[in-house]
Structure formats: structure tokens, C-alpha cells
Image (cartoon, grey):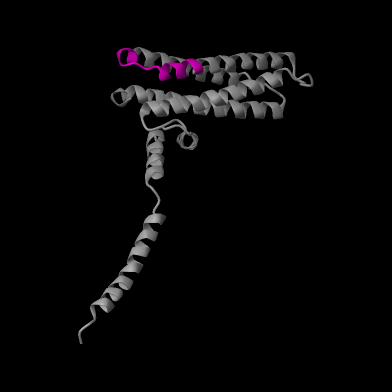
Amino acid sequence: MAHHPFCLLITLTLAFQPTVFFSHFASARTPTNAAPQTQDLVRSSCEHASYPNICIRTLSSYTGPAKTPKDFAQAAVKVSLSRAKRVSNYLAQVSEAKDLKISKRQRGALSDCVEQISESVEELRQTLSELNHLRVETFRWQMSNAETWASAALTYEDTCLDGFQGFDGKKLKSDVKRKIRNVGKVTSNALYMINRLDESRGRA
């Protein structure tokens, strides 16, 4: 039996519409692959860092467009600098507290630590400034500067931490050590990222 052309057109249209609808729905629900690619890049960059899990967590939450070794080095130093500043302010407030009951020697250690973390902040500032103004003709010299300053920042943080070994105040000692250790970990990761940038200068 022959089909009327108009009926055949209606049948084909109804048969085709669900396909179009579900194809459109599927494409609308398919996420872009930009975020997974960024996460994969962060993970591969942090794989051999001193503290890979911390590296992944801090760089994943970084809002800048980190895609190259230079981007990651800058981002890592920014994280370290931000945390060092917070710890520096915290230590300054603690050292100025009038109700702080610690010995004269411990107060001296705290004062030294305030100065050391302040120096660490300055070293990280110089590191970031150098990374922000890299030039092809002076790359090796600038990378040497950045590595030296980041290493110095880490040394200051370690020295500050060592000064608290003899503290009796458990709460103060615990808080200070935890905060300084956290700064030391992100600074160590930042130094790794700087070294990684140095090794991959062709892609910087």
C-alpha cells in the first residue's frame, strides 16, 4: 500500500525529533575538558615535589592561569609568600602580648624567630620579583638569584623552628611549630618549582 507523501513526512519528523532532543541533551550535559586538563597538569607538575599532596592542593586552588613551568613557579612562590606573611604577623602579635608568660630566653628565641620569618618574607619577595621579570639574555643569572633567595627563605624558616625546641609552653610551641612547618613545606615546594623551571628553560 502506497504512503501519502505528507504522512511519510510526518512519520520521519517524529522519528527524528527524539534523536535530535537527546543528542542536544547529551551535549549540554557533557562537561568541558578544560578543568580535568588543568588538574592533570597540576598533578604532573607536583609529582616529584617535596610535599606533592600539599603542592597539588595549593596550586589547584590558585586562581591564576598556571600552564607553564614559569606560571607554576610564580604561583608556588606567591602561596609561600602569602603564608609567610601571615605567620610573620602572627609571631609579631604573640611577641607583643603582655600576658605572655615565658622565660627571658624563650622570649629571646621568639624575638629571633620574628626577625627570621620577616627575613624569609623579604627573600620570597625578591624571588617573586625576579620570576616576574625573567629575560632570555639573563635567564641563568636570574634563576640563580631566585634559587638562592628561596633557599635562604627556607633556611630562615628552619632556623626559626629550631629555636622553639626548648619552649615549655606546649600550646604556644605547638601553634608556632605547626604554622612554621606549614610555611616551610610550601616554601620547599616553591623551591622545587623554581628548580623545575630552571631545568625546563626552553619551555619557560
Q: Image quarter for residue 95?
A: top right
- Residue plotted at (33% across, 64% down): 20
Residue 103 in sight from this viewpoint: yes
Relative to 16, residue 27 above or below: above
- Residue 60 coordinates in the image, percent (x, y): 46, 37
- For the view shown, which residue lies furthest in the bottom direction? 1
Q: Image quarter for residue 114?
A: top right
Q: Between 83 and 169, which is closer to the camera in this rendering? A: 83
Query: Which secondary structure type mostly characterizes the magenta part of the structure?
Result: helix
Relative to 48, residue 128 above or below: above
- Residue 98 coordinates in the image, percent (x, y): 78, 18
Q: In this view, does 88 lie to the left or right of 41?
A: right
- Residue 67 coordinates in the image, percent (x, y): 37, 33
Q: In which quarter of the image is the N terminus?
A: bottom left
Task: Read off the magenta span.
Answer: 125-140
- For the view shown, which residue lies furthest in the right direction? 99
Q: Image quarter for residue 200?
A: top left
- Residue 185 coordinates in the image, percent (x, y): 51, 28
